[in-house]
Image: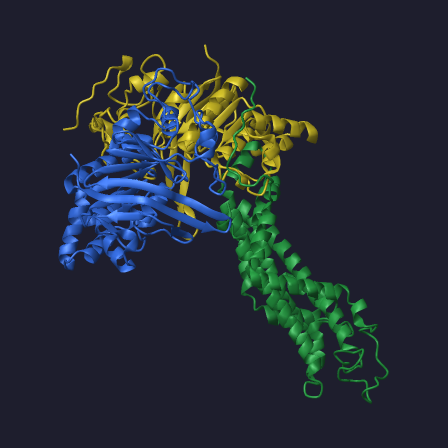
Chain colours: A yellow, B green, C blue
Amino acid sequence: MKKSILEVKNLKKYFPVVGGVFSKPIAWVKAVDDVSFNIFEGETFSLVGESGSGKTTTGKTILKLIEPTAGQIIAEDIDITNYSASEMRPLRRDMQIIFQDPYGSLNPRLPVGEIIREPLVVHRVGNKKEQEERVVEAMQVVGLRPEYLRRYPHEFSGGQRQRVGIARAIVLNPKFIVADEPVSALDASIQSQVLNLLMDLQQKLSLTYLFVAHNLAVVRHVSDRIGVMYLGKLMEIADTMELFNNPLHPYTQALLSAIPIPDPEIKKERIILEGDIPSPINPPSGCVFRTRCIYAQDICAEKMPQLVDIGSGHFTACHFVKKGGKTEFTKKS
Amino acid sequence: MAKNTYIDGGTTTSETYSYWRKVFQRLRKHHLAMIALVILGLLILAVILAKPLSFGNDPYTYIKSVPWIARPELAPPGPGHPLGLDNMARDAWSRMLYGGRVSLSVGFICSFVGASIGLFFGLISGYFGGIADMLIMRFTDFMLSIPVLPIMVVLAAVIRGSLAAIIFIISVFSWMGVARLVRGEVLSLKEQEFTEAARAIGESPARIMFIHLLPNTMAPVIVASTLSIAGNIIYEATLSFLGLGIRQPTPSWGNMLNGAQTFMLTAPWLMWWPGIAILITTLAFNFLGDGLRDALDPRLYR
Amino acid sequence: MEKELLLEIKDLKTYFYTDDGIVKAVDGINLKLHKSEVLGLVGESGCGKSVASLSVLRLVDQPGKNAGGEILFKGEDLLKKSEEEMRKIRGSEIAMIFQEPMTALNPVYTIGNQVMEAILIHQDVNEEEAKKKTIEMLELVGIPDPEKRFNEYPHEMSGGMRQRAMIAMAMSCNPDLLISDEATTALDVTIQAQILELMKDLQKKIDTAILFITHDLALVAEMADTVAVAYMGKIVEYSSVKNIFKDPRHPYTYGLLKSIPSLISKKTKQPLPAIEGMIPSPYSMPKGCYFHPRCPFATDECRKNMPELKEIKPGHLIRCFHPIENDKGVSK
């Protein structure tokens, strides 16, 4: 049995929408709404979804960068849901994050050597000399010249900056890293370099990743398991190959068919979803996907389907997907 | 596999250059600011070297007699006394130099103190938000809604005289702009991912504020402080001109103007020079501030 | 079957004169676009694709300047036209849609008013007719409830709807050429699929030629008839979409295609065949072929001379001394 390194149970994060003279909440954005999953040691678990699906919020809530509204976060058998900032501090050595924006995630007034050294200073690892040695080592591992130690972020290109961010995340030898859209701001030729680096580091440092992304081709390449999110809810979880070969949830099917393919000779039949993603402030009743689903029936408006195991670790949240993966879809009349 | 493949490119220079060097490079292209910088440099040098530049005169000594006119009081310019003597027969040139010391230091110190208070309040207010933010910002609004000059006059009349008192009075009224500015900056910096990255590392709020937020708010604070030096010099001059600032016999440009106004018709030169000094200094600080604003503009950067 | 030539860009150069030096954003680009054809212009950031498209409309801002070349639109050089004449062409004969419709739309006017404005400027119609035409256009681009949406402001619409409104505005005057600059980049993948479908559909209906600019090779495969691959202000490969994807000859195109994670391959979690290094700084361009520092096949010749864009087989042009032969891999 694989060892679960992180467990998320019924996680919810509602952001208040404030208004009026007294800044009282007048509505709630249900960014993450009742999400549960496990991450096993050594694997890459990915959360995919479009904007507003809550995938980034989920990743940041797990690290307690955002306070959860409800639910549980269990990291290696410790319930950290209600941990305070100071209680979290020692745990942060093991849980790190790589950010999307290679420009905004580095302090422009610090040389990159200092940026990478910060985690060591905060956690009082070694003396100054030892810290500097580890910074040099981390820079080498991510493919940055240690001579660039004293340079400032603005002197680097996007891909190099992303490597600085990665070096900062690995310098404490963490076990678990949330990679929040780590390549989406990078050019195609740089994207593959950084993906290679991330996969290489996973092997060398036996890391577990929570990989958050919207690019399905990238996710397919790096993940062991994938969770598909839509409007704050998990729609489907499955092993990578199972998900791509046998998507069961109508949303996953549409999402996969929308991926553009770099081959002019493949003209595939596309499921074009109608309409826009609804607002997370006022999501549809019942199944949140029903407003765009071609198979939606009356029951979908009444009851939110639960995420259930339909066999061998394939979870789906749809009324019409039964045990063993049998589907009973009928087109809307 | 030996990991010696590095990713090159991206940078243009072989040596690293710091942010401030780049700022100075940009400032150098701003002609007015550079002229202002030279003028201010000369002024500061002059007031530091007040003693050797005074031709052996002392700002506090009453001159018994001068050869070119019968009475030494209000003597016009002559050899050894390039700006003449004031109504108490003291050398006006050396009083200008020593008075500049007082005026410039009031300007600098008040700006520094004001910026420090503003930074402190702005950081707390922006970073913590909530009730702290509400209280600090309403207090700032309150301070900004007070008519400054009348209150300063009243305060100066109550605690008369010393240099420290004047600095205190001016500083109390010169931090609000910086506080608002810093709060705004912090609010936007807080949303940037490097602040979140610092939290992900486990940094304490104090460390985040001082290592990550403070250095990133310095650019606008420096601009605002430079511009406020000019304002503070004028406040000092105004208070001293009204007879409520720096007290005789200590010279300042303001109280020299005050002393000279009575003799505007008989000895007009006594008024020109402190007036011109105040004008040039405040203009220079304003030009320098404008130049710094352009040179530090983050939109030109990255 | 040679179609009528609509746009021909000859040796176009657009340089930016900055304090730190001259940036040759577009450095001698040649392109041909025939009537009702879709030309894909792909490349990474800094390749000059956006500047090239702005140059066609003469919308490049200071410190950018045209530094030579010709832009022949229906046989006339746009670079020789007066500002007045250009204004007439923009929006009516050549229309453009951008990546971020929010910044391209004016936030203080309703969507309907903005589309109507475009029609009123370029067509000889009265307000009533223009309004009717506007509602027709909104319906054509798939905006539901067009009468009601006419009075909505840009911020009240979703990204996809805004992009539809932009397309309605661009297409309202039946332009001969539509320039689409990363028009779907900011959109979610299911919305992107909708917009691409719409563009294909409209292209057939209105018979417009499209200059389709993107960084995403997959989109080019879907949309374009011909493809130009740009690198550092120069075209490095130029051919039919089939040739580019099935028989890429330039090491850059080849490497780029190889480095995209596949959606078919059975082997995942494998190292991707990435292009080494990164794009050079525009202030210190390498000598010779701009791609040589990253090219696995670079020789001394590549380090010294810039290769010309040459036809290596009918309709297939590349800028390389050592074109990739079939089955010759970058990994070799």
Examine the rendered structure and indicate whether residue A321 appears above or below residue C220: above
**Left or right of residue A60, residue C13 in this image:** left
Which quarter of the rendered picture does the N terminus of chain A lie within? Answer: top left
Percent x, y for residue C87?
26, 56
Q: Is residue A152 left or right of residue B256?
A: left
Nearer the observer, C35 or C264 = C35
* Residue B178: quarter of image: bottom right
Q: Which quarter of the rendering shows the C terminus of chain A?
A: top left
Regarding residue A302, the answer to whether it shows in the image is no
Residue A258 in which image quadrant: top left
- Please provide percent x and percent y for residue B88: 79, 81
Left or right: B231 with respect to B44?
left
- The residue located at (22%, 38%) in the rendering is C199
Residue furthest toward the bottom?
B70
Q: Is residue B36 left or right of residue C233?
A: right
Q: Position of residue C128 (x, y in %)?
A: 14, 57
Query: x, y percentage for residue C134?
Result: 18, 51
Q: Nearer the viewer, residue B250 or C242?
A: C242
Identified at 59% across, 34% down, the residue is: A148
Residue nearest the viewer, comparing A199 with B21: B21
